[in-house]
Image: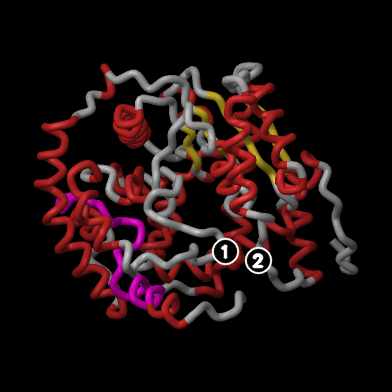
């Protein structure tokens, strides 16, 4: 576990866990009640404050969302979005670091945290609500040393969960139906209507954020790593950059992240003895789908980068991405990249416990195809496998 945070941050985290909206901050009233009904209104007692918060806020969100839509649109069918760039990679593989580096280029844009939390109302609510919420936002993310604010680039998965309810992240909010929501990781078991709802939500969100910035978007969601076919059907001209990291490090960090984030998103008590099985299963499913669909991406529109090399030589690796994907002239963004690297200093990661030999054996068995694909060494587990 990470060392205790300052007391002010601990207080904020406690309040967010008990009363915060989790991953459903900007949900509409009807969608919220439909979600509750689908889960038989089973919210455990410790999370009643969170459910009350969501009930009250969703009642305000619905009319505000209607007003914002009537004032600003967008109409996805008539809104140009440019050529989006998707950052792919497992949870805890360095996708946030890579996303932040790429977003230094002002010729692109990205959804920020506030937009992903309130995708339906951020234009009307931001001027007043963000000022209130910033006092409750911890200075760093729950699971690592990454600074956070409402203006930082953020994953679009939360927005999609709010817009259409088709996201495997809802399995952490309602763990009694975790298996049901996990089908929205790959969408292979989803219906045609569910896939359409997801694509409509993604298209709407990309068009809305792109309409406001007037620039192509750089989007990041680890979940998208398993959805290449859906992404290409939605945005046929999309480009992709994928980052991989040693599976041992992903495992350690993913386990830590789960222990920190699940209590923030949960509306039902979670059995943390199941976390390891969940981590092993999600990573395996993610990359089985990725390797099965990777060849669908046309030549010249996918580039692979190593997390280890990116941390060691960020300028060189980012320039290689620009060359491989034929992005705009790298020299124009270099000064901003250099300034960002100077401000952020060395990229620091959490320190985690060693992996037991038995667990390393399981990683070799279940994630071995990823070790092989990227040439990562295996440590001797001293056990028969």
| Image coordinates for residue 256, horizontal then vertical, percent | 59, 68
Q: Is residue 21 left or right of residue 181?
A: left
Residue 32 visible to an observer of this rendering: yes
For label 2, the SS is loop
Q: Which residue is pictured at 65% across the width and 18% down the height?
A: 300
Screen quadrant of the N terminus: bottom right
What's the residue at 26%, 17% (across, down)?
Answer: 78
Tell me which corner region of the image, top left, top right, bottom left or bottom right, holds residue 7. Answer: bottom left
- Residue 192, quarter of picture: top left
Height in image: 86 above or below 115?
above
> Does the magenta-highlighted stretch encompass residue 27?
yes
Is label 1 in a helix, a strand or a loop?
loop
Residue drawn at x 59%, y 52% as measured from the top left: 343
Q: Magenta segment range?
A: 12-30
Q: CA distance from mark 1 to mark 2?
A: 6 Å
**Comes first in the chain, label 1 or label 2:** 1
Residue found 60% across the figure and 79% down from its top: 3
Q: Residue 259, position in %: x, y?
A: 53, 70
> Residue 224 in the image: x percent, y percent?
50, 39
Q: Nearer the viewer, residue 177 or 305?
A: 305
Q: Which residue is mark 1?
A: 144
Discs 1, 2 touching: Cβ within 8 Å: yes
Residue 289 higher or lower than 20, as above or below: above
Relative to 273, say whether 287 is above or below.
above
Circle number at residue 153: none
Instruction: Look at mark 2 in the image and give the residue it sits on.
Output: 350
In the image, 212: left or right of 34?
right
């Amino acid at each position: 576990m990470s060392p205790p945070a300052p007391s002010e941050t601990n207080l904020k985290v406690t309040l967010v866990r008990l009363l915060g909206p989790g991953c459903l901050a900007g949900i509409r009233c009807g969608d919220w009640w439909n979600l509750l009904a689908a889960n038989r209104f089973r919210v455990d007692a410790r999370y009643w404050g969170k459910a009350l918060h969501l009930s009250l806020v969703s009642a305000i969100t619905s009319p505000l969302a209607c007003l914002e839509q009537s004032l600003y649109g967008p109409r996805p069918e008539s809104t140009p979005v440019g050529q989006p760039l998707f950052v792919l990679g497992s949870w805890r593989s360095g996708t946030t670091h890579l996303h932040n580096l790429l977003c230094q280029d002002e010729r692109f844009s990205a959804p920020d945290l506030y937009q992903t939390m309130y995708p339906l109302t951020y234009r009307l609510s931001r001027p007043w609500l963000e000022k209130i919420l910033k006092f409750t936002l911890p200075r760093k993310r729950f699971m690592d040393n990454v600074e956070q604010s409402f203006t930082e680039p953020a994953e679009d998965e939360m927005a999609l969960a709010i817009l259409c309810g088709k996201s495997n992240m809802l399995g952490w909010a309602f763990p009694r139906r975790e298996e049901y929501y996990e089908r929205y990781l790959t969408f292979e078991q989803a219906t045609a209507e569910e896939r359409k709802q997801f694509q409509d939500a993604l298209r709407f969100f990309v068009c809305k954020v792109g309409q406001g910035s007037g620039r192509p978007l750089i989007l990041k969601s680890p979940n998208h790593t398993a959805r290449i076919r859906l992404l290409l059907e939605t945005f046929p001209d999309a480009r992709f950059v994928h980052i991989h990291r040693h599976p041992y490090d992903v495992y350690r960090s993913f386990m830590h992240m789960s222990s920190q984030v699940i209590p923030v998103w949960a509306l039902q008590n979670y059995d943390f003895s199941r976390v390891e099985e969940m981590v092993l299963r999600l990573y395996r499913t993610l990359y089985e789908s990725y390797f099965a669909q990777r060849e669908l991406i046309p030549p010249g529109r996918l580039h692979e980068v190593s997390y280890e090399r990116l941390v060691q030589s960020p300028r060189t690796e980012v320039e290689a991405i620009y060359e491989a994907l034929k992005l705009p002239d790298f020299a124009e963004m270099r000064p901003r990249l250099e300034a960002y690297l100077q401000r952020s200093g060395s990229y620091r990661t959490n320190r985690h416990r060693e992996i037991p030999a038995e667990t390393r054996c399981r990683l070799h068995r279940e994630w071995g195809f990823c070790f092989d694909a990227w040439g990562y060494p295996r440590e001797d587990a001293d056990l028969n496998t």
